[in-house]
Amino acid sequence: MKTMSEFFHMGGYAFYVWTSYAISAVVLAANVALPLMRRGRLLADLRRRASVRRRA
Amino acid sequence: MWTWLHKLGSPPRFYRLTGQLLPWFAGLAAVCILAGLYGGLWLAPPDYQQGDSFRIIYVHAPAAWMSMFVYVVMAACSAVALIWRIKVAEMMASASAPIGASFTFLALVTGSLWGKPMWGTWWVWDARLTSELILLFLYLGFMALEAAFEDKRHGARASGILALVGVVNVPIIHYSVVWWNTLHQPATVTKLDAPSIHISMLIPLLLMALGFKAFYATAMLLRARNELLARERNSRWVQEMLTQ
């Protein structure tokens, strides 16, 4: 069974391995966060228009 | 089958169905990626030649496979959009491009981070690396061409043709390690005889590959649904949905 410090050390390749995983995590997170944020803005805008139209 | 597909092409139906599918894709992606990370980073033994650096494969290979898979989906959607003028297919192609570009970028960057300790260089003009870089430019060209038109449907037609022409690059990427014997290692998993990788290393890789596919479905549907809502904002089904 390996220890936590061995795990983080990655046999001396820690920089290459963890940088790869960190960049991947950031890119994947952005691919979900950006469309979700756009959806929030879009729905808020559409609801505002709808309420203006109802009052008119 | 055809009537079902035709109904799927109707925006409200597409919006409703994908809304139901989304949580399943997102859940599948999360479970597979977490299990794959645990198996790949913790359980799998170090490679006898490459030590722990081989663990980069668990993001590198799925990202590289997806860079080609997404391109094929994008080209197929573009073909459907060009032939049958189905708006939903157009949006799926357009939603795929930034995600495919992300996967291509990841394949190149993680490949570079793997190449440095193993080959001693960040980059070589090897056939595999060069054709993958061309794939990134194809994605970026698709997005730029699409954005260059005032009318979105004209943009989709032009970029759709570019996507179809660019398909020729996909088999070149796949067979590059066979046709040109340069620095990139040949295929480990996607060959006809048994994969040359131990089962404890293979299972996490397959889990990551499935997780990335489900992730793509999630991210692509999120984008396509946004685009659909934005373009159909004045239609009746969107108005009805908002007042509910």
Image (cartoon, rainbow, N blue to C red):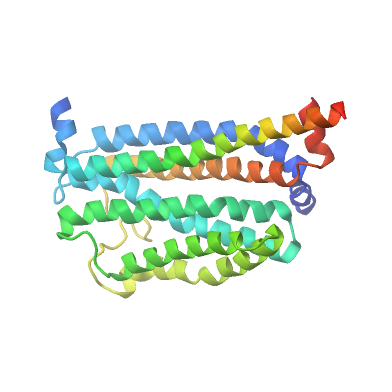
Note whether residue B207 is visible: yes
Hey, which residue is sitting farthest left in the picture?
A12
Q: Which residue is drawn at 42% across and 35% down?
A: B32
Q: Residue B197, percent across and down?
A: 27, 50
B127 with respect to B169 (left or right): left
Position of B149 relative to A18 (above/below): below
Q: Residue B242, percent across and down?
A: 77, 29
A46 with respect to B51 (left or right): right
Position of A14 relative to B150 (above/below): above
Hey, which residue is sitting farthest bottom in the picture?
B179
Q: Quadrant of residue B146?
A: bottom right
Q: Residue at x 17, y 40 (%)?
A: A14
A7 with respect to B217 (left or right): left
Q: In which quarter of the image is the C terminus of chain B?
A: top right
Q: Which residue is drawn at 11% across and 41% down?
A: A12
The mark tally for this picture is 0
Q: Which residue is drawn at 61% across and 69% down?
A: B161
Q: Quadrant of residue B43?
A: top left
Q: Residue B243, percent across and down?
A: 80, 26
Q: Residue B68, percent across and down?
A: 46, 59
Compare residues B226 and B178 and report the one nearer the observer: B226
Compare residues B192 and A1 and report the one nearer the observer: A1
